[in-house]
Amino acid sequence: MNKSYVLIAGFILLIAARPILAQHQHGGGMPSGGMPSGGMPSGGGAVPGYGGGMGDFEKAIAVQATERQAIQLRSWAQRTAALDRQIENIHRISESQSLSGLSTEIEQLEAALAADNMDRQEFLVSLSKAQHSGLHKPVRELTRTDSAMTKAFDEIKQGSGRTEDTKLLTKGLQIAKKAIAIERDEQQRVAHEMGATV
């Protein structure tokens, strides 16, 4: 009799366990739309930041500045700030003194512009393909400042030789100021994106 009871109880437990086993095999033990054992959401969902372009986290990692780039960027930004002060100084002198006394300042400005241009080129060349992609907008603006600076200096140099007319000099200084302002803004933007300081 005891043996019969044991067999009956075992049969009942087996029948009761079948629906549970079927649910585990077909549903992965998770509600519909949940996360199965493979790690990807069921129902065709995508993991945020993947499959739809570069997410914020991936971009932050991709554009992170190397130690050398951080130093280059800081040095370049300091040089650009000094260049801005030189432009202001030339503007003050042109308003208060004869333009014939600007020769030394113009020579110093030419050297400073060349150095700033070199810093810009060296930094941009140092960027990896991933950094270029992640920073394409500020990189584009920084590239444009090169030609703007060249144009500005040409007009400043020509204008400084016209003692009777300061319009060309003033125009060149204005172009230079605008280009420098853009360059400094983009340096700040790049530094922020790359996790560096300027």
Image: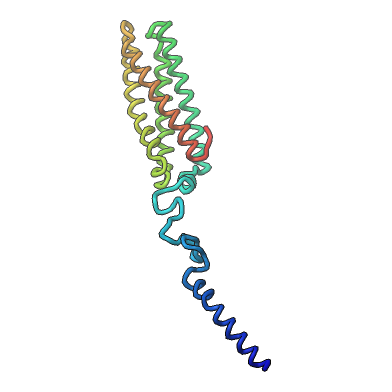
Instruction: Tell me which corner region of the image, top left, top right, bottom left or bottom right, holds residue 5.
Output: bottom right
In this view, 160 is above or below 110: above
Whether residue 113 sits left or right of residue 165 in the image: it is right
User: Residue 154: horizontal and vertical position, in percent?
Assistant: 32, 21
Q: Does the rendering let one see residue 115? A: no
User: Residue 75: horizontal and vertical position, in percent?
Assistant: 50, 32
Whether residue 148 sits left or right of residue 112 in the image: it is left
Q: Residue at x 48, y 30 (%)?
A: 77
Nearer to me, 154 or 138 = 138
Instruction: Tell me which corner region of the image, top left, top right, bottom left or bottom right, holds residue 17.
Output: bottom right
Q: Residue at x 36, y 36 (%)?
A: 140
Nearer to me, 18 or 156 = 18
Q: Residue at x 47, y 19 (%)?
A: 85
User: Residue 70: horizontal and vertical position, in percent?
Assistant: 51, 38
Q: Residue at x 43, y 32 (%)?
A: 186
* Rendered image coloring scheme: rainbow
In this view, 164 is above or below 18: above
Instruction: Tell me which corner region of the image, top left, top right, bottom left or bottom right, holds residue 2.
Output: bottom right
In this view, 31 is above or below 123: below
Whether residue 11 sits left or right of residue 111 in the image: it is right
* Residue at the farthest front position: 1
